[in-house]
Image: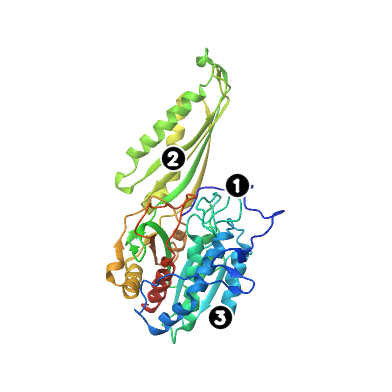
Amino acid sequence: MTVLYSGPEVPGDRDGRSSITDAALDGLITASGVSMASVEDLAAGRGPDWLDRCLERSVADIIAWRRHIHANPELANREFGTTELVVSELRSLGLRPTVLAGGTGVVCDIGSGETCIALRADMDALPITEATGLPYASAVDGVAHACGHDAHTAILMATGAALVAAPELPVRVRLIFQPAEEVMYGGALDVIAEGWLADVDRIFALHCAPHLPVGTIGTRVGAVTSAADLVTLSLTSPGGHTSRPHLTADLVHALGTVITGLPSVLSRRVDPRSGTVLTWGSVHAGDAPNTVPEQGTLRGTVRTAEHAVWRELEPLVRSTAESLLAPTGVDLDIGYRQGVPPVVCDEQSTAQLRQGAATALGPEALIEIEQSSGGEDFGWYLEHVPGSFARLGVWPGHGPVRDIHQGTFQLDERALLVGVRTFVHTVLAA
């Protein structure tokens, strides 16, 4: 899920800090190999035989990769260690991975043929302090894998290993390990700019879903996520004494006008069926109770479920804000950052993914999901090629639901094998 966050100074640098010692943690990569950890394969025996054997042999590796990445989280565009791990493992399979131009992120093809199916996993962590208490919890202050990207990366690594073991593949497969999903503008744009979608016919992705039980896959035809844009309004006034607001431009009153007025007007200018909503998250102006401030800032997000509406939102927000504030006398500067388009899954790609998941797990594993108001930069890929984005159930079926983007987020590691099987069968269903 994309965070509308960007800043020059963020936690997570390792300068001056001791590195984590993986040998002290259960189920991680160590100097002498992989320490053993295992989970139940919920779809064991469903085949094909080569996939069953591959997962039985590699389950400890998959868990180790995920826990290693989890304990060593890296923020957007700093995923150097994760990139190194992915490249090393892919090369050990006899593959020839390519690192993206920015030094993080990996692309690797498996098989041959003109038809190409892409599978994508995001790699970056969040600027959040982990509070799980797990033995392999984040060793980096203020940085944690609280959105499941560690699992996504491990699943795609294991999918690569499984596809290499396949006797034959119906298509060429491109693994995309994408950096920087959690920031604007995200790493999907870098992948596209470097030409890695030019020969791709379809693209698929899975994302951890703590509200779905492990062993299930949630799909939907149409919009799965929403567009998410960032709006910043900067107001200025000559300032003055609060006893004489008529002699200046009352900046706080103007802020109040636009805080309530802009969302209200948008709700009347946009089709309510589009799920469009403007929500303010930050407002700052002044300090003294008897002084009209000279400056004020208002920041929020605009989200919509409709692609056509998303294209029209920026000029509508600008013109509406200007009209609302014109009578107040304040000066206005509008910053509008278009974030990500909605993820819109086409019918044919979703049918292929559903067929793959049903074959891998059984038809009872399929769940129809509702559209989320969250943003995801996977939507940029779908601006260029058809594809589908599914939710991977990670709730163990008991205990509290620990949501993403929280320091307490946890996942049931049985979902890792579920994800691998779903990806592999989606390729086989091509």
Amino acid of disc 1 = Gly
> Whole-Å distance between the Cαs marked 2 and 3?
51 Å
Q: Secondary structure at mark 3?
A: loop
Q: Is residue 13 above or below residue 197?
A: above
Amino acid of disc 2 = Val
Residue 363 in percent (x, y) is at 28, 70
Q: Secondary structure at mark 1?
A: loop
Q: Which label sits on residue 93?
A: 3
What residue is disc 2 on? 317
> Which residue is rendered at x = 36% and y = 52% of the image?
306
Q: Is residue 337 visible?
A: yes
Amino acid of disc 3 = Leu
Q: Nearer the viewer, mark 2 or mark 1?
A: 1
Q: Which label sits on residue 7?
A: 1
- Name the one closer to the observer, 185 or 97: 97
Q: Is residue 104 visible?
A: no
